[in-house]
Structure formats: C-alpha cells, structure tokens
Image (cartoon, helix red, strand yellow):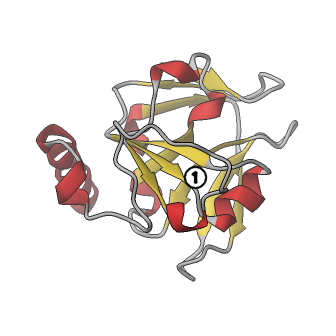
Amino acid sequence: MQGGCTCGAVRYRLADRPMFVNCCHCSWCQRETGSAFAINAIIETDRLEVTGAVEFVALPSASGKGREVARCPACKVAVYSHYAGAGRLAAFVRVGTLDRPGDCPPDVHIYTSTKLPWLVLDDRVPVLEGYYVLRDLWSEQAQARRVAMKTRAAK
C-alpha cells in the first residue's frame, strides 16, 4: 500500500498490511478532520517508509495524554499520527491518504456514542460506544506483531 499528501511532497509505503484499522467517531476526530470520523490504519513505524520531510505537530487528545501528528510541511495534510500509548513505535496512518483507501476498510467503529446520527454503519463490523480491549479484536498475528514491535524497541 502506498499513499501521500495532496501536493506529493510526502509519500509513503506500508511494508506490511496494517495490524488493525480503527474508524473513530469521537467528537475530537470529527473536529480535527472536519468530517464524520477518522480512519486510521495502525502499523509499526519501522514498517512505514516515508519519502519527504514531515513536520510533527503536538495536539491535545481526549485522554489528556496528547498525540503527535505528522503533516506535510507544504500542504499541511495530516499523513499519520503517534498516540501516547505506543508513542513513536506505531503509526496511525490516515487511510484517506492512501492511493487506494478502499483497500483498507475498518476493523471496528469506536466511540460511536458521539457518532453523527445520520450516519448508518455496516453491522458486519463491530460497533462500540467507546474503545475496545485489544486482545478481543486484534488477530493473533497482529497481537504478535505488536509484542514484537515493543520487544524491538526495548533492545
């Protein structure tokens, strides 16, 4: 999978499939994207190959722990983020920046307690009012990749 910003100054390639894809309906994501939700594909940062410089912008989050958003310095498109839980070990790639975003459907809809009322969700994908327990939804392979990611970082 490949993608990039609007102007093309930042391009990236995922060296593996994402571990998991969240579709977040929280009011923070709605405000930040100017849309009904944000879709993030979670991948190990060392499996995200970026060409071009990004600028990191620190933003607050509902958890109070903040996040870091990687934006194109020219067109300001948010390409990926790092959240406090995994820090820079995991990148939350904005699915809308993929060349083929349809290849990366959500594995779960989260924070639907603040979902916009006119949006109808596919009931074949788990729908949760809040967040989820990772071990309940992530595949065994994705969980193993996450453990390996943390192990590599600890060395």
Q: In this orientation, which residue lies closer to the viewer: 25 or 92?
A: 25
Relative to 100, residue 148 above or below:
below
Determine the secondary structure under disc 1.
strand
Q: Position of residue 84 (x, y in %)?
A: 47, 70
Residue 97 shown left or right of residue 8 in the figure: left
Q: Quadrant of the C terminus?
A: bottom left
Extreme-bottom residue of the structure: 64
Q: Quadrant of residue 142?
A: top left
Q: Residue at x 69, y 30 (%)?
A: 52
Residue 8 lies, in percent from the top left, at: 77, 22
At x 71% / y 57%, what residue is drawn?
Answer: 30
**Quarter residue 100 falls in:** top right
In the image, 41: left or right of 138? right
The answer, for residue 35, to whether it is visible in the render is yes
Residue 35 higher or lower than 66, as above or below = above
Residue on which the image places disc 1: 81
* Amino acid type at image mark 1: Ser
Left or right of 139, for residue 112:
right
Q: Residue at x 50, y 42 (%)?
A: 121
Residue count near mark 1 (Cα–Cα under 10 Å), binned few <14, some 14–19, many ≥20? many
Does residue 135 lie above or below 46 as drawn? below
Q: Nearer the viewer, residue 102 or 64?
A: 102
Count of marks, rendered view: 1
